[in-house]
Image: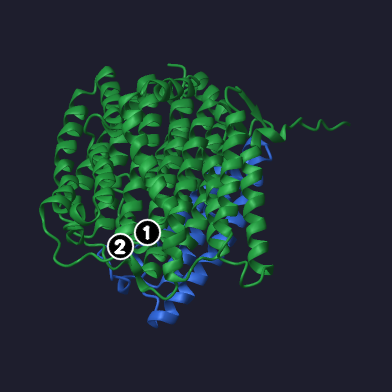
Chain colours: A blue, B green
Amino acid sequence: MEIPISYYLILSSALFAIGTVGVLIRRNAIIIFMSIEMMLNAVNLSLVAFSDLHRSIDGQMLVFFVMVVAAAEVAVGLALIYVIFRNKGNVYVDELNIMKW
Amino acid sequence: MSIDIPTICLTNIGPLITLSVAGLLLLLFDAFSGKAMKKAHFHQFSLVAVVIALLQTVWLWNRQTTDFSRMIYVDNFSFFFNVIFLLGTGISIILSVHYLENYRKNYGEYYALMLFAAVGMILMAAGGNLVIIFLGVEILSIPIYILSGLFREDLKSNEAALKYLLLGAFSSAFLLFGIAMLYGGTGTFYLADLAAFIKKSGMNGFTYVGMGLLIVGFGFKVSMAPFHMWTPDVYEGAPTSITAFMSVGTKAAAFAAFLRVFLEVFPTVRMEWDLLLWVAAVATMTVGNVTALAQTNIKRMLAYSSIAHAGYILVGLIAGNQLGATGILYYLLAYTIMNLGAFGVVIAVARKKDNYLNIYDYAGLGFQYPGLAAVMSVFLFSLVGMPPTAGFLGKFYLFSAAVEAGYIWLVIIAVINSLISVYYYLRITVIMYMQPAEADLGPVAMTPVVNATLIISALAVLLIGIFPGSIFQLAMNSVKIFGS
């Protein structure tokens, strides 16, 4: 039995939405970061599904690029969070308010 | 079975190769050279790389082709933007040297990251495939996240970098989801194929969602309202030289991609995105200008002004005709020069460790440093858009394109906004010339190279404002690819 494309899309959109909500309501920088990763992986899922739908390899190729970019972003992001933790003692984004938002 | 290896021509990506190789070499030098070698030569090396890349770009003039299996456009549009990016990178490098030495942060990786960011910008303007545009966005953004956090001990810099990183990554997720949706709707990433598909079969649900998400993704990068919230904080907290670099580089690159994607892929569905951008442009201009009125920190004020300028440029994009696109290119070139010049003066006046960033610190500058105050006034007049500066003509082209396309109300709102902006730009001129200094300003450290750069920039702003002909022709030539 073939799984219809809509299943993949619903799952991927749900993951993307959960990630978006996570970014908006959580206050720990690391959790926000995890939420962003979830959004990127939701995109990956939909790319793979579309790739299968169109019988073309392009979508799967982009998935690899997204993974690499996500890894690079995490490397930079964790380094920054680490520096902030060392200077401040916590990583709550609502306490990062020297400059008004 | 045989595999066709596509023919590629490396000279087409000459500037990219030069910049990447120079960046990598800088990293190696930094790691393996002795202490004495350090500091002195990194900026010269990177400037040489930028100049070589510029020469290679000039050599690419007037080719109309694609390369790397249509991944890269080699046309006058990318030529023009290459010139803007390399100019911006070069001037930023010159302005950085002294500033970094004050902070004892004159590291090799600083220049390497700047060159990598320039590579990302060039890819964004030249990308013929959404994958390349996405990679360009990331290659541009990741170095800038690091550079904004360069002052590790400074909490403001940390804060700026983290905010930029979180919101930047958030926005690239939206951009990426938009790309995935466009792929889902059409089965291709190539801009040309996307355009052909939409022209033939019209839009479907996926492409609509994709288009909307692309607007969100690019909107973040150009700091379009309501996605502008990161701009003031990041601009204020980041090192001033980086603020200068990203205020012109990131904006120009994001507009290049925005322009290319929307005028090439979605021209047939103008009606759908016009209204959205109309509202966004009005909001961007108004929020930027009105909030800038209340700022006393000059970096923050220039950040809001850069939001307002994004709004003016959006007016050209909404007009969507040849004149509008020409105006955007002209305006971005003028904006690059005048904004970098203004930031150059800010760096000079702020002196050691950014102590003098309040606008009232400029009191008396006109008497103690007449030259500095004069060039600052030229840049500010140009940012206002007064004749005979380049800023005036840029605005003139943008707004007359919008009139030609029938957006009278948009132009009226834009002109009112320009009038509001007169207040906060000219306030600085007034403070410089009309108010006496509270104390002796002390020595402003200027090197001959920085002096020369500021003077040449000020002259360039005046010159391309008085004789716009050749630049205008060049810009017009560059946008011929958008036939409409």
Q: For residue B148, say whether it is visible.
A: no
The residue labelled by disc 1 is B240
Name which residue type carries label 2.
Ala
Q: Are marks 1 and 2 in contact (CB under 8 Å)?
A: yes
In this rendering, is residue B5 above or below B120?
above
Please report whichever mark, 1 or 2, sits nearer to the chain's N-terminal start: 1
The picture places residue B132, in percent across and down from the top left corner, at 58, 41
Chain letter of the residue carrying label 2: B
Which residue is found at the position 45% from the left and 57% from the top? B96
Between label 1 and label 2, give the one nearer the viewer.
Answer: 2
x and y percent of residue B201 in the render? Answer: 51, 21
Disc assigned to residue B320: none
Residue tagged 2:
B350
Mark 1: which amino acid?
A: Thr
Above or below, comparing residue B134 to residue B445 in the picture? above
Q: Of B190 and B98, which appears nearest the observer?
A: B98
Q: Quadrant of the C terminus of chain B?
A: top left
Disc 1 from disc 2: Cα separation:
9 Å
Looking at the picture, tell me which residue is in the foreground, B64 or B287: B64
Q: Nearer the viewer, residue B68 or B119?
A: B119
- Location of residue B52 by image quarter: top right
**Residue found at x 30% / y 46%:** B306
Who's the residue at 29% across and 27% down the image? B393
